[in-house]
Amino acid sequence: MQKQWYSISGGNRLEGTVTISGAKNAAVAIIPAAILAGECCILENLPHIQDVNTLEFILSQLGAAVDFTTGDCMRIDPTRITSTSVIVPEAAQMRASYYLLGAMLGRYGECDLALPGGCVIGARPIDQHIKGMRALGAEIDIDEERNILHARAKKLVGTEIFFDMVSVGATINVMLAACRAEGLTVLANVAKEPHVVDVANFLNMMGASVKGAGTDVIRINGRPDLHGCGYAVIPDQIETGTYMIAAAATQGDVIIKNVIPTHMEAVSAKLMMEERPRPVNIKTLVYPGFPTDLQQPMMAYLTTASGQSTIHETIFENRFNHVRELRRMGASISVKDNRLARIKGVQALHGADISASDLRAGASLIIAGLMARGTTNVSNIGYIDRGYECLDQKLSALGAKISRLSKQAQGRR
Ligand code: UD1
């Protein structure tokens, strides 16, 4: 097996133009959603990232005809699906495999699913997904020993569901199942993230009736059949924010293309530069607040601010694993109760050998490497591959000195 890492010689200003790929979090929901159609769907602007490749593999294993060989375009013919059992290791490797539950239940009234994994950033239960499916009439059993969920429904029937907390995953998942339930489903206390709206738009293109996505209440009138369609996924809000932060962190000058600026307001409001980054206080919140997925990249940027910043993580209970690695580069950060980080700005970071603990932690370390004096080696980059398309190529085109290196896994590098 090959061990791969990014080697970065820091200190280069990023300059030029970068084009943002399709949104990971929209793509990983819209691909399973295509199962709901009785015909072929053609999806455009999909990112070539590991999570999308994994879903492509899972759908093919189920019998769907999937073609992802033409640029950013994926053709999915779900009519050939012969199995509703998603008990494959790949499903357990990624968080978003949970969307197969809503799609399969909606389409076939059954699903067996290896419970999702993904980035280790907290407990991440799926009780709200299950609450929603049960409310629609599904019977759900969990085999805790084998970590498998079994779902069956003779018929899904629309109802009112109030989520106990705002969850992106639960909102989308229940929305998928409800599209083919009998009658009206009203979802309250829902997530308003841009990809929730994107999935709703896709479902409506397939003939569903989803109203209110982007507000606190979504109303879904179930339909017995959905048809195929063509759909282009929105640009990635988190990739955009990552390049915005990387540009600011290197005092660069970057034009970012394929962006929806209104999705970026919470980030723009916090990126303030003089000679050095200005210290800011950040609290992660559900959309339209500051996204938890960007607090880690933002922390790297704030390590050299002209004073003390704070980051209060309110969404996940274990999202400061990058702090230890940033400290190894000379950052001065203290963390209280795994929820509140105080970042005292230092003059500069220095290169180090560091390791990504999750996807956005990886992005944070890459940005720190771009800022640092000397060479930084970032290992465990499989996490970064899950969510960033051609990261090294895009950064190199902006003038960064970054290479992807590999070696046989035995021994130390
Ligand atoms: C999604 C995103 C992820 C982002 C997160 C928050 C995808 C594929 N991933 O993750 O990038 O960081 O939203 O914006 O879109 N919770 C429960 N019970 C549930 C569901 C969630 O307690 O049934 C909790 C979670 O543990 C977490 C919080 O609610 O503390 C928010 O989670 P959620 O919005 O569901 O995040 P994900 O869908 O996992």
Image: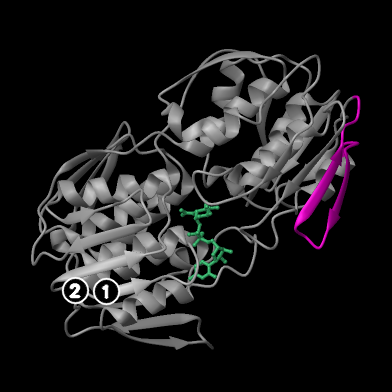
Q: Circle 1 sits on which residue?
A: 84
Residue 299 position by quadrant: top right
Residue at x 78%, y 22% (from the top left corner): 10
SS under mark 2? helix
Question: Which amino acid type corresponds to the residue marked 2 in the rendered image?
Answer: Tyr
Question: Which amino acid type corresponds to the residue marked 1 in the rendered image?
Answer: Thr
Q: Residues in magenta?
A: 329-347
SS under mark 1? loop
Q: Where residue 106 sits: x, y (%)?
A: 22, 70
Q: Quadrant of the C terminus?
A: top right
Residue 348 position by quadrant: top right
Q: Where residue 86 sits: x, y (%)?
A: 35, 71
Give the camera-side residue of 394 and 191. 191
Q: Where residue 248 sits: x, y (%)?
A: 68, 21
Vertically, is 106 above or below 358? below
Q: CA distance from mark 1 to mark 2?
A: 8 Å
Task: Indicate which disc, 1 or 2, sits on the residue closer to the N terminus.
Answer: 1
Q: Circle 2 sits on which residue?
A: 108
Residue 222 position by quadrant: bottom left
Residue at x 38%, y 56% (from the top left corner): 216
Residue at x 45%, y 51% (from the top left corner): 51
